[in-house]
Image (tube, helix red, strand yellow):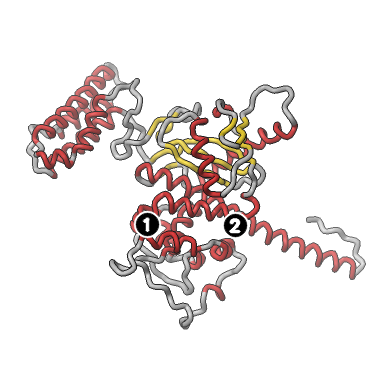
Amino acid sequence: MLTKPKNTTQLGFFITFEDQLNHEHPLFQLANHIRWQVFEDAFSKHYSATQGKPAKSIRLMVSLLILKQLRNLSDESIVEQWSENAYYQYFGGEQIFRPEQPCVATELVEFRKRIGTEGVELIFKESIRINGKDSNDDTLSGDTTVQEKNITYPTDDKLYKKIIDKCLIIAEKEQIELRQSYKYTIKKLSIIQRLRRNKGGDLKARKASKKIKIIAGRLVRELERKLSATALNKHSIDLALFTKVLAQKRSDSNKIYSLHEPHVKCYTKGKEHKKFEFGSKVSILVTQKTGVIVGALNFNDTLHDSKTLPDAIAQYERLTGKQAKDIFLDRGYRGPKKINQTNLHTPKPNPNITKTKRKNHRRRAAIEPTIGHLKHDYRMIRNYLKGAVGDEMNVMLSAAAMNFKRVMNLWVLSLKFFIEKICFVIIKIFCRLFGLMLKPTF
């Protein structure tokens, strides 16, 4: 149910945030530049006008999503800090201070599910719009990276042990009496595996690993025999996943690396410190002159970099309403030279290359630190949101947060420059009045 609009005509006994807070603070300015009504109009269709409990305001929930990525916090942390920070509360639409949490952390999960990837893309679109003329550049830089998922480093033994644990949980839930639980057997085999580096321990550890796999397969088959038709249909997806994990080999494609995130893929980017990365591929498009992120798209397949460009260009056109003229890429994109009306440029030995084109290729390298900031400062280094949909949302929210932060930094720098200029003028006038021939040193 939609929340009722607040009556702001009658103020309380306390002074409002408008009178209390610093109007030059970047968050205060950002709150007044974002078009919140766009989100109200787009997301109100997801709520009932008459039924259910009144929901939290749409502006509050959207602001929490933005602040979460902007400050690199978890759902729990942003809800807790909101009750302590007056600027956060003003950003969320409050007029006076509220010493309480705005919502339960799990409500952010439900809100993300409610608005979906289309709603998150709308937030990303607003972050591009708020950068104004800086986002109008039609010459772009592109690159891909890997967004790692929040899973443990996958090994066969880990997967087999998880299958055994999940089989025991299913048997307990459906009240099935297994022939053996193998609880103490698995414990003994795990101890043997830990002694792999001891003398003669490698052969015993391999035998223990094989035994664990046999036990996992035995439990899966026993469940398939003893489950009723209704229960078998209920757990068919899990059992099929277990069977696939037990049957897969080292050289297989489309392997399962995690039971709770089966869509995760393995990527090798040639990094010396990290040979394999487990997650999804991300395509990033950035304006060459200003560095505004105008494209952020997630892919859950092991695609060649050039295959990601059609969808990335389509997203750019959808968000900005115009067509890219040139995109400068690295050699991983070798292949097509043109997509629709967009020219694709990859570096290659060319003695007749123009000075402008050489400069653009060098400028493309600026996207690398942008990706680094996206990962380390805006929560893209490890994705904690569930499923393939969570991958898409996290990428666009991270890109939106970085765009918002860019505008906030520009406001701070412009204010600093304005203050320094005024100080320079005052000191110059002071020097002339008193006949001092001193030059300012800053």
Q: Determine the residue positioned at 45% across, 36% down.
A: 281
Spot occupied by residue 323 in the image (x, y as percentages of width and height): 59, 43
User: Hey, what amino acid is under mark 1?
Assistant: Phe
Asked whether, in this view, residue 144 is left or right of residue 290, the answer is: left
- Where is mark 2, residue-wise? 408
Spot occupied by residue 100 in the image (x, y as percentages of width and height): 39, 68
Q: Is residue 80 something that shows in the picture?
A: no
- In the picture, the quarter occupied by the N terminus is bottom left
Front-lying residue, 150 or 242: 242
Q: Determine the residue positioned at 27% across, 32% down.
A: 159
Label 1 residue SS: helix
Q: Residues within 10 Å of mark 1 (few under 14, many from 20)?
A: some
- Where is mark 1, residue-wise? 111
Q: CA distance from mark 1 to mark 2?
A: 26 Å
Label 2 residue SS: helix
Spot occupied by residue 410 in the image (x, y as percentages of width and height): 64, 55
Q: Quadrant of residue 261?
A: top left
Asked whether, in this view, residue 135 is left or right of residue 187, the answer is: right
- In the picture, the quarter occupied by the C terminus is bottom right
Q: Determine the residue positioned at 26% across, 26% down.
A: 193
